[in-house]
Amino acid sequence: MHPIVGVWSLIDWRRVAADGKVAHPFGEKPVGLLAYMPDGQMMVQMLASDRAPIDSPDPVGGRVDDRAQAYSTCLAYFGTYTVVGDTIEHYIKASLYPNWSGKTAARGMVIERGTLILRTDPAVINGVSIVNEMSWRRVSGASASHHNKTGNT
């Protein structure tokens, strides 16, 4: 089994510009999980840790601007993956950002001292060349025994 298999907790998401400037799209303490299953399935969810609540009991309700802000502080997708050398390819079945659905996203990959670092190829965003760098720490002890007392997940 490849060492990538397992559940990883987000440490940081850095957006590094060609001039060396660093931004943190979801702030300096984002939260998230990345899961690689042995059968080739994967899923990821990254969020800002300080997201404002939406004033509605309906998870798809609320004011349009509140929902837009919530959308802007969350990134999620799922699909399958393949490891090719020091690159991992995510075949995205569906994504919160619809432009990624049905696409492949390649990430440079390295595991250093228990930290998984994924890097995108450079991309031009708002006229600036950037590389996204996501750092993850393996979640230890994740198992079925962590379900709640009713057996639900």
Image: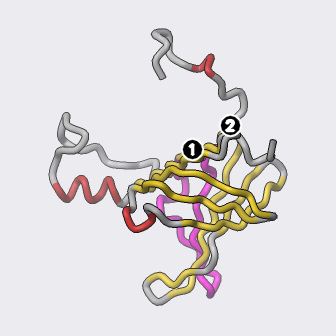
Q: Which residue is mark 2?
A: 139
Element type where label 1 sits in the image: strand
In the picture, the disc for residue 19 is: none
Type of amino acid under label 2:
Val
In the rendered view, tell whether residue 1 sits above or below residue 133.
above
In the rendered view, tell whether residue 139 sits above or below residue 111.
above
The residue lying at 39 percent from left, 61 percent from top is 97
The residue lying at 74 percent from left, 48 percent from top is 4
Look at the image and give the residue range highlighted in magenta.
8-31
Residue 140 lies, in percent from the top left, at 72, 32
User: Which residue occupies the foreground of this view, 36 or 66?
Assistant: 36
Q: Are marks 2 and 1 in contact (CB under 8 Å)?
A: yes
Say which label, 2 or 1, has the lower sequence index: 1
Q: Which residue is mark 1?
A: 33
Give the number of callouts. Answer: 2
Residue 49 lies, in percent from the top left, at 46, 48
Element type where label 2 sits in the image: loop
User: Which residue occupies the foreground of this view, 108 or 16?
Assistant: 108
Type of amino acid under label 1:
Leu
